[in-house]
């Protein structure tokens, strides 16, 4: 009994120390967990990021429903001779200068005439855009051409609703201030006025006739290259546009235009002739020395 009476205070002290240590450890774990959650939340919450604009090249097939085609199932591709025209150096220089002069006239134009444009011209410029290179030649693009006035107006309503939120909340003061000199805002009259709206969708994967899915490598980069060629083709025929990537409009526009789930909106282009009173900002392009490095 005497021994027990001596040990009791010691045991009580040890027990208090253990409980105190467990309590401190619990608080530290909770704090760490909160900090990690906070960091993860900050990383995840980037309101200006459009989920539809993220590249879905790295697809984990186990996470996707359906059966995927294997490359070994595809037929061997025949290779054929390639002999493009070769120009004398003087002609090369001339053609390069002429093409630069043409493209240097390209501007983003927000004042577009409702004057009709031949549909065949639009078909040809999109056919030209379809010549772009793509990852494993998957050609992961869909060009939706809208000319119906009611559908164009529905597109405008969706875009303006989201763009107002973008300008007032998502984009932040710095972005909005940087755009102020361009005199742009969430009002997009050209979406009604332009004779055509071309909405470019990237196909994050392909749907084959046999029901299987096909990986589309570098789908966003491939479609972006195609868009660049499309802009050049429009400039070549004397039409104008403004590159529009309205944040967070993709899902609604995909639903409106009845596009499948594997297609994500990348860009929206209103296309037509410039309005007779069209104006553009007096911007200057960087000189060659600022954009080229010879090694």
Image: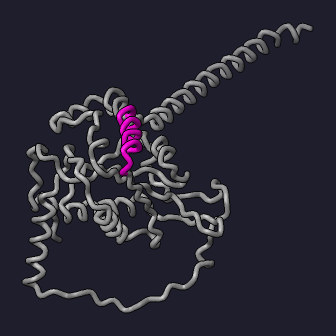
With 294 as the anchor, is 141 left or right in this view? Answer: right
Query: Can the viewer see residue 267?
Result: no
With 236 as the anchor, is 167 left or right in this view? Answer: right
Structure colour scheme: one colour
* Quadrant placement of the C terminus: bottom left
Q: Is residue 211 depicted above or below 275 in this figure?
A: below
- State the residue at coordinates (12%, 47%): 276
Residue 288 on the magenta segment: no
Residue 281: give x, y in percent of width and height. 12, 43
Residue 268: give x, y in percent of width and height. 35, 49
Residue 108: give x, y in percent of width and height. 20, 49
With 201 as the anchor, is 108 left or right in this view? Answer: left
Which quadrant of the view contains residue 209?
bottom right
Provide the residue span drawn in magenta. Answer: 147-162
Residue placed farthest to the bottom in the image?
A: 81
* Quadrant placement of the N terminus: top right
- State the residue at coordinates (41%, 90%): 80
Residue 150 on the magenta segment: yes
């Amino acid at each position: 009994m005497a021994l027990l009476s001596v040990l009791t205070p010691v045991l009580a002290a040890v027990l208090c120390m253990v409980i105190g240590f467990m309590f401190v450890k619990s608080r530290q774990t909770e704090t760490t967990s909160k900090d990690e959650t906070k960091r993860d939340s900050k990383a995840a919450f980037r309101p200006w990021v459009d989920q539809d604009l993220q590249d879905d090249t790295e697809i984990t097939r186990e996470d996707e429903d359906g059966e995927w085609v294997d490359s070994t199932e595809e037929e061997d591709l025949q290779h054929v001779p390639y002999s493009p025209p070769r120009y004398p150096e003087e002609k090369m220089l001339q053609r390069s200068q002429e093409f630069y002069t043409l493209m240097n006239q390209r501007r983003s134009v927000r004042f577009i005439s409702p004057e009709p444009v031949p549909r065949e011209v639009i078909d040809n410029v999109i056919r030209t855009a379809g010549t772009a290179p793509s990852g494993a030649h998957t050609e992961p693009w869909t060009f939706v051409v809208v000319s119906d006035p009611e559908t164009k107006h529905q597109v405008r309503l969706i875009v303006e609703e989201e763009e107002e939120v973008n300008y007032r909340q998502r984009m932040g003061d710095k972005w909005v201030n940087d755009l102020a000199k361009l005199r742009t805002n969430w009002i997009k009259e050209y979406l009604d006025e332009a004779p055509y709206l071309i909405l470019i969708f990237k196909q994050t994967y392909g749907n084959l006739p046999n029901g299987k899915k096909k990986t589309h490598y570098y789908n966003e980069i491939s479609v972006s290259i195609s868009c660049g060629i499309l802009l050049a083709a429009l400039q070549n025929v004397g039409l104008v546009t403004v590159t529009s990537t309205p944040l967070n409009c993709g899902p609604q526009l995909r639903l409106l235009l009845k596009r499948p789930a594997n297609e994500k909106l990348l860009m929206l282009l209103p296309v037509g002739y410039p309005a007779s009173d069209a104006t553009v900002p007096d911007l200057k392009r960087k000189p060659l020395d600022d954009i080229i490095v010879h090694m």
